[in-house]
């Protein structure tokens, strides 16, 4: 029973991170605008942070910043320097698996028969 439970936990964690990444950037979920007084002549606005916005900033700003500080303190930035080519490769190079699988998939999809309306 341990393996299916572990798989379920990993899938739920990945889904949670994807949810936070997608919806954490929305302005409505990043901060909520509250007008404390209606009788004020000027609009007084205070921003209350939401949990989704906080988790988005935690995942994409605070944790990488802390890891970068630790890297600079203990290894003088060598980990970031050695991981940079890997990041460039993953982000910008054409992967062989993609080049082998994507064109046949597109060709197959374009050749599928369609039903007339």
Image (spheres, rainbow, N blue to C red):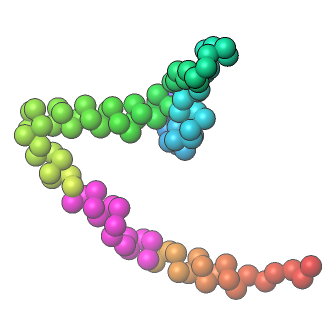
Residue 93, picture quadrant: bottom left
Residue 9 lies, in percent from the top left, at 52, 32
115 in relation to 51, above or below: below
53 in relation to 91, above or below: above
Q: Quadrant of the N terminus?
A: top right
**Left or right side of 26 for 75:** left
Q: Quadrant of the C terminus?
A: bottom right
Pick the residue in front: 55 or 82.
55
Instruction: Report whether residue 26 is seen.
Output: yes
**Left or right side of 78 for 15:** right
Residue 75, picture quadrant: top left
Q: Residue at x 45, y 71 (%)?
A: 98
Q: Residue at x 14, y 51 (%)?
A: 81
Pick the residue in front: 49 or 80.
49
* Highlighted magenta segment, given as a residue range: 85-99
| Residue, far right | 117
Residue 6 lies, in percent from the top left, at 50, 33
Q: Residue at x 21, y 60 (%)?
A: 85
Q: Residue 96: within the magenta?
A: yes
Give the overall secondary structure of the magenta segment.
helix
């Amino acid at each position: 029973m341990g393996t299916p439970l572990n798989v379920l936990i990993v899938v739920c964690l990945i889904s949670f991170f994807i949810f936070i990444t997608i919806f954490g950037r929305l302005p409505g979920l990043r901060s909520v605008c509250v007008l404390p007084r209606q009788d004020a002549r000027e609009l007084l606005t205070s921003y209350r942070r939401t949990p989704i916005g906080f988790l988005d900033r935690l995942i994409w700003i605070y944790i990488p910043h802390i890891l970068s500080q630790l890297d600079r303190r203990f290894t003088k930035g060598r980990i970031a320097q050695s991981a940079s080519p890997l990041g460039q490769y993953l982000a910008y190079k054409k992967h062989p698996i993609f080049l082998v699988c994507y064109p046949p998939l597109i060709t197959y999809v374009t050749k599928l028969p369609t039903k007339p309306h």
